[in-house]
Image: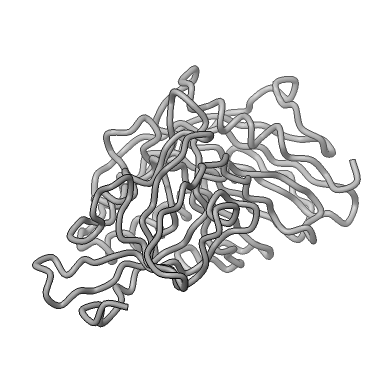
Amino acid sequence: MNKHFVALFSIAISLPIASSKAAEPGTIGLQVSQIYVEQQATHRGGLVVRRVDLASGAADAGLQPGDLILEVDGRNVEGHARKELLEWLNGPAGTAVQLTVISQGGKRGFTVRRKPYPPHLNSEHDPFRYQIPGDWTIDPRYTFPLPWAASLSYEGFGDVGFSSGFDDPDSAEYHSYFFLWGLDHQISLSSEELQKDLTTYYRGLSEQRGHNNQFAPDLSQIHVSLKPLPVTSLSIEGNSPQGFKGSFTIYDRRGQVIELNSEVIDTHCGNAGGTAVLFFVSREPRPSGFWNQLDAIKKSFACRGK
């Protein structure tokens, strides 16, 4: 390895994280870290392969952990920022990217075909199943009491998935996401109870965001409004599902107050299955095309064994 490659940036890059409106987004199936180069003005060097996903285009091409990526489609990686490198590496499923790599066999070229992202699946031990688009970002599972809303008196867990454009204020997907509460007991929540709990949830989240991003939220700005959504509009398995729709007024990570549209489903699976509360959230109202992704998550939800 080049002697100038003396350390690694601490951040890992999962490649790629993007969405295409014209075609299904694709991934080459690598996780990499960027080399720190002392002699380079930006200190940004090549990309070291940390993991190769099974059945990915990178695995098919023969890339291995420890390989060093020097060029992407003939462009030198060194000196370029993470965001720019992701723009080079991402693309529609079915297309290919040319990589110049130093591997155990020396310097050579690889043609790597992008494949559709495999969906994110919830734990097989849950009493229900659902899937989230593979190009979304998934947080590790939280358990109640939630770190930012410890006063919520539930027992169970929370899952969160963020759209690929969640952090881009210029994207139609900005602050669009899905979260789920898997509660240990069967509960039928009213719109008033949900409004109260979500106000607590988002006030705590706003305080956490303010602390992490150096702003002071005015918690009186946090509002949640929900009304019943007719059960006949829900295509979901379970016992007596309830539906709600409305809006959340919250702080984003930049300290701006934004209004989000939301739909909520409260259902359970069997006598011992507890309760699943599903939240679908987007700055875009229906009939924005982004709701197709949220509706696909809803349609994927089912009780185990059905």
Left or right side of 211 for 26: right
**What is the basis of the colouring in this image?**
one colour
Which residue occupies the extreme top position in the image?
Answer: 287
Closest to the observer, 136 or 4:
4
Residue at left offset 61%, top offset 44%? 132
Taking 293 as reference, is 167 above or below it? below
Taking 7 as reference, is 287 above or below it? above
Closest to the observer, 123 or 152:
123
Closest to the observer, 297 or 203:
297
Image quadrant containing the C terminus: top right
Taking 38 as reference, is 16 above or below it? above
Tell me where residue 46 appears, x and y as whole percent. Answer: 29, 65
Taking 117 as reference, is 55 above or below it? below
Left or right side of 163 for 45: left
Tell me where residue 271 appears, x and y as whole percent. Answer: 90, 52
Q: How many marks?
A: 0
Tell me where residue 251 appears, x and y as whole percent. Answer: 31, 47
Left or right side of 172 for 218: left
Image quadrant containing the N terminus: bottom left
Residue at left offset 33%, top offset 74%? 10
Left or right side of 10 for 140: right
Q: Quadrant of residue 208?
A: bottom left
Tell me where residue 56 appears, x and y as whole percent. Answer: 59, 51
Residue at left offset 72%, top offset 37%? 300
Closest to the observer, 264 or 120:
120
